[in-house]
Amino acid sequence: MTIRTRLGRIPWQAFVVAATAALLAVLLPPGGTAQAAPQGGRVAAPEGTRGAASEGARAAASGESRPVYSYDRAIRESVWVDTKLDGDSDGRTDRVAVDIVRPREPAQQGRRVPVIMDASPYYSCCGRGNENQKKTYDADGRPVQFPLFYDNYFVPRGYATVLVDLAGTNRSDGCVDVGGRSDVQSAKAVVDWLAGRARAYDAPTGGERVTAGWSDGRTGMIGKSYDGTVANGVAATGVPNLKTIVPIGSISSWYDYYFSQGAPLYDSGPEWLSDHVESPAAQGRCAAVQKNLVDGAPRSGDWTDLWSERDYVKDARKVKASVFVVHGMQDLNVRTKHFGQWWDALAKHGVERKIWLSQTGHVDPFDFRRETWVPTLHRWFDHYLMGYDNGIDRAPMADVERAPGKWSTDRVWPAPGTAVRTTLRPGKGDLPGVGVLGTRPAPSGATETFTDDPKLSETDWAAHADEPTAAKAAFRTAPLAAPLRLSGAGRVTVTATPSTATAHLSAVLVDLGPATIRNYAGTGEGITTLDRRTCWGASRDGDSACYKETAPDTEKVAQTVVSRGWADLGTYADPHKGRPLTPGKPYTITLDLAATDHVVPAGHRLALIIGGTDAGLIDPPATKPTLTLDLSRTKAELPLTGAARALSDTPRTPRIEAQPLAGIDTLRSLRPVPAAR
């Protein structure tokens, strides 16, 4: 006798075995006592107490996987997968450590399960999640704690969770190469092994062959930051059996992490990150790889072969997996250009995709929208890894946070009508450096001048948008007659004459008007961590499913920077190579603005501000140039909806004498400017 489910016919004995195991397993949180359910959470205890037969039938009827398997009895094991690379040149191919937790009952029944995989360099050096969890092991080296909730929640629902130490980290062999071939192959080899195409062993060296006979080959990768970046890279190889990826705040091209059109974004290159995450053993054997990272990533900002290898966008055509993108629109670590260019490339090649955009900085959705994130992710994996027809592929494509905790949905993203950008042009105002922004071009000969001040940032400029200051030029619309929506990525073309041989340019879009926003420049980047916990899945000794709750960290502001872009003016002829400038000669350059989605309310004003060094976000040039803008040859091309109704006549402002912005340090400048209370 067999029982028919959405996943096929299953022997009735399988349901009896699973039901018995589930009824015998009472899963308790750490400490051994049951907990009351915190509001909105999931209690660990009931996860293993439901009968598998009834739950299996209900799952088939409801179109979702159910927690019918014992987490406490789950199989925990480690294997070492051969990457077929020898990154540390020791004469042996590198093996990466793979820690696995999977439900025992399907294996006993001869059934295979899909895999949720997070490949990371952070499992021993830095930790994962808001509570910086690390992997832990027992005295015999068997894995105990799996960071984050994926194992606690999904293993009882019939998934395996696989955590991969990238080459050169934690218990893996090889070297870290920061997004290069070794990093990507570290995870791709595991996807191949899960599908029977690669080799693994039960020890770091030597040992016995281990197969993944328990895996059905279907793999989904997930991760925030570096982890999600590796998922992007693996998907861009086109590897079979990778069914979906969920990159959260992730990089799509490593050049754009360290540079913006030639302007350096940090005071170091990828060698610092490699050194930061590598295991002590790897640091002793990977000097040659470190040297390659230094030599291949010159601080000139020129594009090299190293960056070509780490550009996943160019290979978007190879992506076979569906993609669920999550990004904070105020992420100043992994800037939003990353998701924007990746999204556009995926769209061009018809990749199935979904997107969430929050108002946070570099924050995981588990910590800014937990109650909705967990069931949404559950549906996503159920559809793409288990094959449930639950409608998530037909749901609205985009969720966008409009105010702290307030979300809207869009059938498609970017918003319809934004493919053809609206052109806005700067013009002279009544005050030096304080102009107007509208649809009419400035007359020939109209100029504005500013001098780079590396101590000042975009928030300083925005706070003084209506005042003549020496370090920026600001151009503002009139108060909007209707809401104006910016959805997608824009660009600003500038013609500027520098006074020195090097110069940087910044262009920022600002919503001038009062609002309550997430305090993305705060320590939590838009969230506050609370003391109380909620539980999301099953727990066992050493691996709790209970996590601290969070709440929005908000701030009242008088203006909000909503998009920005930076460039070295020396890349005017080629974004991949800088050239010395001739003082007194005009140069025309187009700056890419980072993707975003923001509604400027009626009554507010939209401002375009052009400056030099954006303190804290790009490194200053060798000089402090004065730049003269040719307004007749400067324009912003923006993905706007509602422009025809929103834009009205340009404003006039009272004359104010120019004042320097003195005494504002960089730390202060990175914070939103509070509105008057």
Image: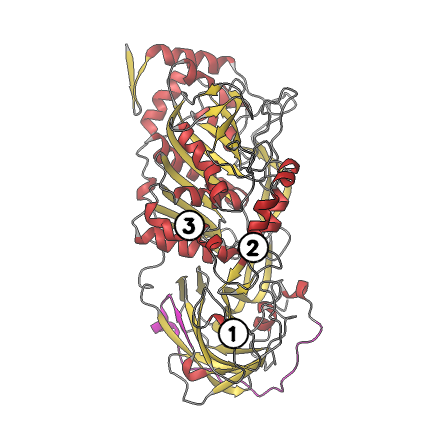
Q: Give the Cα distance between marks 3 and 2.
A: 21 Å
Does residue 264 appear to the left or right of 384 in the view shown?
A: right
Eyeballing the image, is 481 above or below 303? below
Q: Is residue 659 above or below residue 676?
A: below
Helix, strand, or loop for circle 3?
Answer: loop
Tell me the mark number nearer the camera, choosing from 3 and 2. 2
Q: Along the polypeptide, which appears first: circle 2 or circle 1?
A: 2
Amino acid type assigned to the residue bearing label 3 in the image = Tyr
Residue 335 magenta: no
Label 1, secondary structure: give it: strand
Quadrant location of the N terminus in the rendered image: top left
Q: Nearer the viewer, residue 148 or 514?
A: 148
SS at badge 2 = helix
- Between 134 and 8, the one lying in front of the other is 134
Instruction: Report if residue 657 lies within the magenta region.
Output: yes
* Mark 2 or mark 1, whichever is nearer to me: 2
Tell me if mark 3 has few (under 14), some (14-19) or many (20+) residues whose alpha carbon lies within 10 angstroms of its own: many
Q: Is residue 289 above or below residue 671?
A: above
Q: Mark 2 points at which residue?
A: 295
Give neighbour class at mark 1: few <14, some 14-19, many 20+ (Cα, 10 Å): many
Q: What residue sits right under mark 1 in the picture?
A: 609
Q: Distance between the residues labelled 2 and 1?
A: 36 Å
- Residue 344, which numbered label? none
| Residue annotated with mark 3 | 312
